[in-house]
Amino acid sequence: MENLLQIDSIQKSFGERKILRSVYLESRTGNITALLGRNGSGKSSLFQIVMGKLATEDKAVSINGQSFYYARHPHRLLTFLPQNFHIPKRLRIIQVFRNFGLPFEICFKKFPELIGRKQERLASLSSGERRLIEVLVVIFTQSLFTILDEPFSQLMPIHIEKIKEILLEEKKRKGFIITDQIYETVMDISDLTYLLTNGVVKSVMDKTELIREGYVNRL
Amino acid sequence: MIVSKHIRQFLFFYGNYYVAGLAISIACGIAVYLWGLPLIFPSLLLKAGTSVLIYVYINVNKKTEFHYYSNLGYSKLTIWCGSLFIDLVLFILVLLLLFKLR
């Protein structure tokens, strides 16, 4: 079944500065939606608003036409990977996967080097390894949609390639919204690309539009 | 099974502040042990006041961890209610135990 996530009428001001003006975004099952934007353009604030963690003047988030905020089990509809580490570092890798009901061996099929380390606590991992665990958990968790804020930051290139493959595989069962400053990586796998600039979201058809909008200097 | 899963998550979250929570409960228990019933009400006030401080401290310092609980299906309110309930039960048990020993 195809599901539709619509994020509409999002507005946000910090004092006099209006960072989001009536933003509209959508995602569907089978799609990876990319959201690009300069640092400080409001991407993370937008996601915090969608998740209900940041108050705003106006917002409407619906899944298949029904308001997300009135859902009885919102975590089954929408999961979120924040920019910063969010899984408590006291947990062991295996505990994290057990808590989410995820089969460890399947999730780590592409990362055999980590299988033997499943009893280690997150605190003992490097930043890149810890980020990898968090990204995998959020991608594999059962939900209709997943928002990933900077999933590729701190990951090494080979892991980025493997995460891209996993995303392309997992999008068959859910929709993803991704933002990351490594725009080429994100655009490689995205079906829809949006650029957030001056508080407004614009649809981007190809990379040359990014130059016109002043997001990059050259390709 | 589901109940034990919830309790496990509440206990894990309680792990963020159990040292402070238990230390205050034991201090209140000792006060009640030494000076008796008149100290019950001040102990309750102390426990409530320190719980507010702990709440603010954790909300500031463990802000991003709430996303983990949210992905698991626990809102901030739920996870706080669950862990504060455990803290309250332990507080009452400590008071009762030390009062009985008096």
Image (cartoon, rainbow, N blue to C red):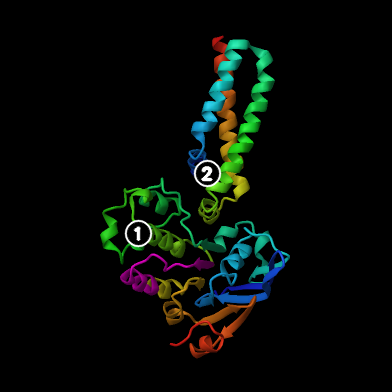
Discs 1, 2: same chain: no
Residue A48 visible to an observer of this rendering: yes
The foreground one among A13 and A69 is A13
Image position of A14 (left or right of A184): right
> Measuring 37% from the left and 49% from the top, which residue is drawn there?
A123
Task: Report x, y in % for residue B80.
Answer: 59, 42
Task: Report x, y in % for residue B97.
Answer: 55, 17
* Residue behind mark 1: A129
Determine the chain carrying the residue at label 1. A
Task: Report x, y in % for residue A58.
Answer: 73, 67
- In the figure, A127 relative to A59: above or below? above
Kindly indicate the quadrant of the structure image that contains residue A197.
bottom right
- For the record, the magenta segment spans A145-165
- In the figure, A211 relative to A178: above or below? below
The foreground one among A88 and A182 is A182
Image position of B13 (left or right of A14): left
> How far apart in space, not on screen, are marks 1 and 2 (Cα)?
28 Å
Secondary structure of residue under mark 2: helix
Secondary structure of residue under mark 1: helix
Task: Report x, y in % for residue A23.
Answer: 66, 75
Residue A148 within the segment the image draws in magenta: yes
Quadrant that contains the N terminus of chain A: bottom right
Label 1 or label 2, whichever lies nearer to me, is 1
Q: Amino acid at mark 1?
A: Glu
Image position of A156 (left or right of A21): left
